[in-house]
Image (spheres, helix red, strand yellow):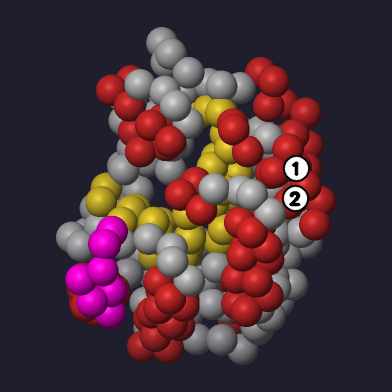
Amino acid sequence: MAKYKIGTTEAGDAGLDLSWVNKLDAMDGAVVITKNITPAFQEAALANQDKLIVHATITGFGGTKVEPNVPKVEANFDALATLIQNGFPQEKTVIRIDPIIPTPKGIQTALNVFRKAIDGGFSRFRISIIDMYPHVRERFKTAGLPRPYGDAGFSPSSEQVKAVDDMLMSVFAYYGGKSPMPKIECCAEPGLTNTIHCGCVSHFDLHLLGFDPDEDDRVGYQRRNCMCYSGKRELLEHKAQCPHGCLYCYWRS
């Protein structure tokens, strides 16, 4: 049995649905994930900063057809900077480029986010490559957007995975030997070689939250190749697509 209970907000967006706040007392800590660092989220994060790690999801597609109701990149980085200026520890923030669309445009978009984050002093990242569920392919078609894996593909080709890997090498080169070097993590992406493979709740997170990192059992439970700590607990209960309306959302409309 897991020693710690670590909450997460993967079923929705912690910036829009603040119901996670009322469940923190039952948790030892939490990883809260949002594409929208709203004033209400900032207030909640600052009030509970000892128990939290914040994942700021910034894919670069905010305000586009892909993420129609997500703030644009500049606005999200500005809001994150305000959160840090108001006292939230930068070392407990993660830039989440999730998902990356492995087309030339999508890879360049992700690279631009990496560069902006590095220029802002961020060094920890989490990434994924987009999963094209049938209902996601239909949304892309309706929006008039090309489907990155064709009409029926769910996963990237080996060439597309390599293109993402090559982009990650250019991220390290952009960092220019500064210290610390960027830590780029992923989970359930076995084809990537230039990343640290660990769960969204990992030994890094247990350490940041003040717990014994050796308790990280990495057994996962959500899907194939999940490496998350088994003490992870979902804090959001609204099982439906959130108001951001992202085309790649795994919840059906």
From the image, tell me which residue sits under label 1. Answer: 44
Residue 70, picture quadrant: bottom right
The type of residue carrying mark 2 is: Phe
Residue 46, picture quadrant: top right
Residue interval drawn in magenta:
174-181
Image coordinates of residue 30 in percent, x first then y, are 57, 34
Identify the residue shown where x is 43% and y is 82%. Answer: 112
Mark 2 crowd level (few <14, some 14–19, many ≥20, 10 Å Cα): many
Residue sitting nearer the eye, 180 or 191: 180
Residue sitting nearer the eye, 82 or 139: 82
**Is 87 contained in the magenta span?**
no
Q: Quadrant of the N terminus?
A: top left
The type of residue carrying mark 1 is: Ala
Image coordinates of residue 176 in percent, x first then y, are 23, 77
Mark 1 crowd level (few <14, some 14–19, many ≥20, 10 Å Cα): some
Relative height, residue 110 to residue 31 (above, below): below
From the image, tell me which residue sits under label 2. Answer: 41
> Is residue 102 rendered to the left or right of residue 68?
left
Identify the residue shown where x is 38% and y is 31%. Answer: 207
Image coordinates of residue 185 in percent, x first then y, are 33, 53
